[in-house]
Image: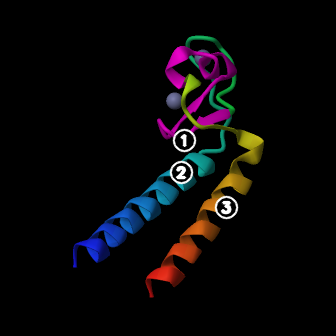
Amino acid sequence: MPSTNNKYSSQQCYIKKIKFLQKLKVSNETLICSIHSLPLKIICIDNKQRICSQYALNNLHLSHQIIPENKFTEYLNELVKVYVKIEINLN
Ligand SMILES: [Zn+2]
Ligand SMILES: [Zn+2]
């Protein structure tokens, strides 16, 4: 059934996204932006990368979802909660 396949692949995508973002979280040495010499304390969800506060103001990221580092754990927990809900709905 195509609809089931779509659900399955979006679920796979989702878990990949969570795993990738979790890796961003565990790199906990303070990284410094080589261009602005600012700490990379903001996570751009769309680019799945850490950015500095100057980059966050950049046009490139304006339409992107960005999360400050101190809110990131909370954000990941929310993602995992949503994932669990999806899984329950599929089964
Ligand atoms: Zn920068
Ligand atoms: Zn971005």
- Asked which secondary structure carries label 1, the reply is loop
Q: Residue at x 51, y 58 (%)?
A: 18
Which label was assigned to residue 78? Answer: 3
Please identify the quadrant where the N terminus is shown: bottom left
Which label was assigned to residue 45? Answer: 1
Vertical relation: 72 (above or below) 13:
above
Could you tell me the amino acid type at mark 3? Answer: Glu
Which label was assigned to residue 21? Answer: 2
- Whether the magenta-drawn stretch holds residue 48 is answered as yes
Q: Do the residues labelled 2 and 1 touch (CB within 8 Å)?
A: yes
Report the residue that reaches farthest toward the bottom.
Answer: 91
Could you tell me the amino acid type at mark 2? Answer: Leu
Question: Label 3, label 1: how many angstroms apart (C-alpha)?
Answer: 14 Å
Where, by quadrant of the figure, is residue 85 drawn? bottom right
26, 71: nearer the viewer:
71
Write down the region rendered in magenta.
42-61
Q: How crowded is mark 1: few (under 14 residues within 10 Å), some or many (20 or more)?
A: some
- Mark 1 close to ligand 2, CB under 8 Å: yes
